[in-house]
Image: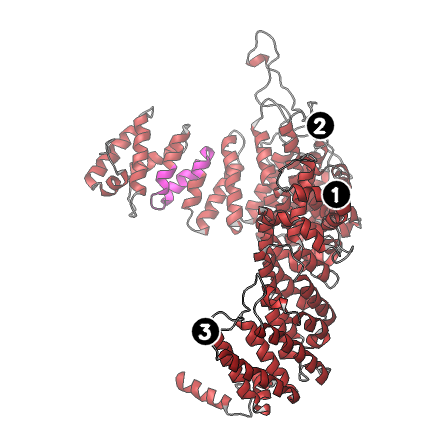
Amino acid sequence: MYSHGSESLIKQAREIQEPELQKFYSRLVKLLQGKELSHETVDSLQRLHLILSATKYTRRLPSELRTRLLSLLSSPVEQLQVLSSAVLREMPPLSAEELNYIQENVGQLNSQTAALLLSKAGTRADLSSVCAQLLRGLDNRPSEAPAHSLMHTLPVLNTILTHSPECLTEDHITLLSKRLVDWLRYASIIQGGGASSGRFFTGPRSRQPVPIAELDGTVSGDFFTVLCVGQGFTEDQWMNVYSFSMLHHWLLTYHSVSNGNSTIETANRSQLSLSHSFSNDDRSEVDGSVVSMVSATSSSSRLLPPKERLREKAFQYCQRLIEQSDRKAQKKTDTELQKACLVEAVCILDCVCVEDASLVFRTFPFIKALFGRLSADLSFSRVLLPIAQFYLNHGEMAAVDCESVWKLVFGQFPAELFSDPFLAHELLRFLRLNLEKFQLGVPQYTHFFPNLLKFLAWDSPAVVDDFVDLLPSLVTPATAVELLHTLLDLPCLSATLILQLRSTCLPISEPGGRGLLSLDAFRNPSFRGLFLFMLRGEAGSGDTIDRLSTLHDLLAEAADWPRVVQCAQTIPVLLHIYFNTVVTVADEKLLAHLILVMLERSSILLNIPTYIKEIHRVFSCHLLRMCKLHPSLVVDQSHELLEFAGIPGNVYSKEELYTHVVWVLGEYLSVSCDSRCSVSLITSCFETLEAVLFEITSSGTPPGTVCPAPRVITTLMSALAKLASRSHDLIPRVSLFLSKLRTVTRGGSVAWCSDEEDLVAIVTRGEELWSLLKAPSVAQSVLTPSPHITTPQWHRDTNVAMPLQLRALTSLTHPQ
């Protein structure tokens, strides 16, 4: 049936006939009845899985075969466990008897059985039943529940807790909390398997119990933790490790289950503040536990509810881990283990203190000591972040000065570890998760924005999503101007960071090396100030620098470096976010300053053509938006806007921005927008735009440039017509120009427009404006309509017939 020469086993599996299938089932049952399962049995199980998975129709297996497959779940051969579990997952939901069979044999639980149980728990009731049976297995004595099954039970419970915590009842929580206390605090302090005495004749009787050791090799004098070492581990020591691995998740989520005893629990919290003043041997409440030598602890903790008692034991366990982390590990891998355990321990302590504020004052002394010990070594940066989280959550309650913490997190970390992708991810995630707290209570956060942006400059694609969330929080009236300059110079910062790293690893002189000129400039003392400004860590030293163009020249060869190009591609997105935020926090004075910055910086950007074009597009969009929100800005900044619009070169090099500047001048330079708008201002603006329009339409394009876009010319013509409609003395001048334009274009092509269709469109627009200006009153109402015309609300105005008509149409189209 399954020959080796077959080209399509899947096709054969789909087309197998029922009689042949029944014969295969019978043969497989006989194979499974044997005492020893052969390779033929494994091969047949693989074929069975292929048959069941190859068709979309569900096949039903004989009950005897199903029973045999269920028994294979507890086979000592892992391959048989995997195959039987895979086959059973392809079958219809297990019957109640089959589920009961698995659950009653929970002592034989392994990862495959656990996966099957979870996949077949179709309802919350099924899941709750599975959970209850698993917890019942945890409640057995060690002799009744093998440790290997318990090791699989905890991960399954953790999975249930992750996806459906509501399946756990209060009784479940109480039981698991008790068992976690037992495993965490009372694991054996003797190495597993015993140890040889070293003599020639050794046997089971001659093996002597050997105590567990610390990472520095000394004998442990306290209870067992995950940082204890030995030649082997006992079953309860493994459960200690498993319990610690899920403790943080358990503490975070068990409170989501409805707690009928919350009032009693809250009342008992006050006992925790007194528990450390008593010392006694605190034995476990759970039968069958192994009570080891323990450090001094509270005898009153036995009187606490299970949740409170678990918090107390978690506190003691983490405190011991912090003490153990100060030991000199003999292996490098153990040093990394110490760091990982410190991260977990501090997170658990933070969680415990959030739930029980009385523990804050007991925890802060050794958290503060831990910070003092680790803060000088940046290799512990990933440990210091949870410590910073602890300070953020509890520093105010404990009245602790957090200044040194924030200088480290916002100062040293980005400045020295900007190239560490793991730290970048964790630090930015830390900021996003606590953004509201930083905005309200940590003023250093916005002050260090130049440092934080180094992560973005170094690896923009990886962190741009984080800064999409973080950037609005960095925009304040105090930082807005400097932040805009910094965002525009971010490609320069990217290049500077690259040079900073290269300068430490490349020789002083390397002829022909890539980037050598910029590297020499970076090392040159005369340019050192420019690069130091780029690398500054804090805001407030100045919005920008005078010699920015010089810096761009020095970094000209960096324009095609991959990191710089990637960084430049992210800036337009962030600028949109910046401007969308700044218009909500800035007053008109600040917005006016930002308009000046946009006009100035449009000429001072790192020479990446696509980058410059995109920045001009962003500036154009938001200049329009600012002026629409605050039309008086046009009068306030009329001198700078006219200066920009009066430079003919801007028509060719900054087409997008120039077009929008001309448009806002023509649109908002009006008495209706600002009473300060005088006839002389309108005339001055008219003369400036007229001179530019005359120059670009009376001569050819400058060398190295293309013809101006038709949109620029039509926008200039429209702006002149609008201004003339507000000062009728200017109408003859506009009309004269438009008539000349029509006369000139009759002769055929012109030097300033290479496309015939574009030329026709320009001439058509000129004729329309000329016709309008023949009737000045009409021209003003068309070119400068009043607000009630541009933003009509006729459907709301009860003085017109529109609402009545709309109601009538509604009643006709939507009959009751």
**Residue type marked 2:** Lys
Q: Give the structural element (helix, strand or loop) at label 2.
A: loop
Q: Mark 1 is on which residue type?
A: Asn
Residue density around tag 3, few if under 14, some if 14–19, many if 20 or more, within 10 Å: few
The residue indicated by pointer 1 is 524
Residue range (magenta): 85-113
Residue at image x 30%, y 48%? 56
Q: Earlier in the sequence, mark 2 or mark 1?
A: 2
Q: Can I make out residue 768 in this image?
A: yes
Query: Between residues 635 and 349, which one lies in front from this camera angle?
Result: 635
| Amino acid on which the number 3 mark rests in the picture | Glu
Where residue 482 sits in the image (x, y, percent)?
A: 72, 59
- Which residue bears the numbered disc 2? 328
- The outermost residue toward the top is 200
Residue labelled with disc 3 = 757
Q: From mark 2 to mark 3, how far is it between C-alphas?
A: 81 Å
Look at 53% across and 37% down and name the residue there.
Answer: 138
